[in-house]
Amino acid sequence: MAPKNQKPFKRQLQRIRGICLALPDTTEKLSHGEPTFFTKQGVFAMFANDHHRDGHVGVWLPAPPGLQEALIEEAPSVYYRPPYVGSSGWIGIDLPRIHDDALTGHIREAYRLIVSKKKRKKQA
């Protein structure tokens, strides 16, 4: 088994870390062998380095209903349905194919989604 190319992995992980750790009360922990970003309310971003040799150096994010399908239809070379969490509407983003501004917007939206979802449950 050939080792994974570490250079793109490290560069893309640094991008994700910079965006995620700038958000309030965010921590990074390993989950399922990959760097994963949490708020007190839960996971909002999961790094994926060629997960099961799928060819993506990506990030997996929760998304509002309908967004996953729309993004994949609009730009299938950038967005994909990730395993495990894709059935719950999460999006996969191929990191080398997205600009920083768009990536930052998606991560911030995922963060807001998780924080607000947990707050709504507490109020119910």
Image (spheres, rainbow, N blue to C red):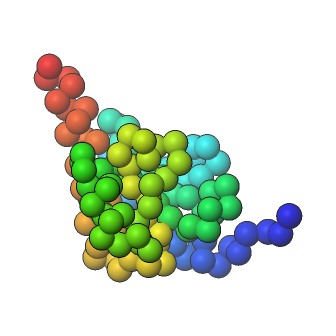
Above or below for 68 versus 78: above
- Farthest-out residue, front: 73
- Farthest-out residue, left: 123
Q: Position of residue 54 (x, y in %)?
A: 62, 62
Q: Which of 85/107 is in front?
A: 85
The quadrant holding residue 48 is: bottom right
Above or below for 65 versus 118: below
Above or below for 46 versus 97: above
Q: Position of residue 42 (x, y in %)?
A: 37, 38
- Could you tell me which residue is drawn at 62 percent across and 57 percent down? 51
Side of 56 where 87 appears, left or right: left
The quadrant holding residue 18 is: bottom left
- Farthest-out residue, right: 1
The answer to whether any part of residue 15 appears in the image is no
The answer to whether any part of residue 94 appears in the image is yes
- Farthest-out residue, top: 124
The quadrant holding residue 92 is: bottom left
- Pick the quarter of the image with the C terminus: top left
Q: Position of residue 101 (x, y in %)?
A: 28, 76
Q: Position of residue 49 (x, y in %)?
A: 60, 62
Side of 113 where 54 appears, left or right: right
- Could you tell me which residue is drawn at 68 percent across and 61 percent down? 53
Count of numbered circles in the view:
0
Q: Which of 19/58 is in front?
A: 58
- Could you tell me which residue is drawn at 48 percent across and 78 percent down? 96
- Could you tell me which residue is drawn at 58 percent across and 47 percent down? 30
- Pick the quarter of the image with the N terminus: bottom right
